[in-house]
Image (cartoon, helix red, strand yellow):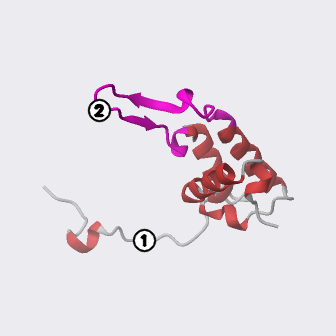
Amino acid sequence: MPITHEDISSDEDLGRRVLVRARIIAPCLDTLDAEDDTGKDAIAILKGVIAALPAAGYERAKSFSRNGTAMTWREIDAAFSEDARVSLQSLCGADSASGLPRGHFPKARPLARVWPEGEYT
């Protein structure tokens, strides 16, 4: 069974928003089973992300303005620390047996089509 918002938060909207952002960081989240160890690791990371979010109200405010009466808020993305991002990506990006990335990776760089690679003097 895939990871759902119910696995990470009792607040449905917040759980859905965090999952949407997490899928951008680690697209394999939809393929992880919430009952497997890898799924449980992902859930623990996502619960930590939610715990890192400041409470609603002034703590979540990023900036204020007086005359223009403007107020900006921290985005969900701000709660994903570098550690959380790398940890989520590691759940998707490495084959546990070999440690190598999984998937198809093109051999030629896209720039090679525009400017041939090689030695230049």
Q: Is residue 47 left or right of residue 27?
A: right
* Number of other residues with Cα within 10 Å of mark 1, as a class: few under 14, some 14 to 19, many 20 or more: few
x and y percentages locating residue 6 in the rendered image: 78, 55
User: Is residue 71 a member of the stretch shown in magenta?
Assistant: yes
Direction from residue 67 to residue 5 in the image, left or right: right
Residue 48 found in image quarter: top right
Question: Looking at the image, which is closer to me, 10 or 24?
Answer: 10
Question: How many C-alpha atoms fall within 10 Å of the one at disc 2: few (<14), some, or many (≥20)?
Answer: few
Q: Secondary structure at mark 2?
A: loop
Amino acid identity at mark 2: Gly
Q: Give the quadrant of residue 96.
A: bottom right
The amino acid type found where label 1 is placed reads Lys
Give the labeled residue for mark 1. Answer: 107
Residue denoted by label 2: 68
Please provide the residue range marked out in magenta: 51-78
Precedes in sequence: disc 1 or disc 2: 2
**Nearer to the camera, 81 or 21:** 21
Residue 42 position within the rendered picture, expressed as x and y whole percent measured from the top left: 73, 51
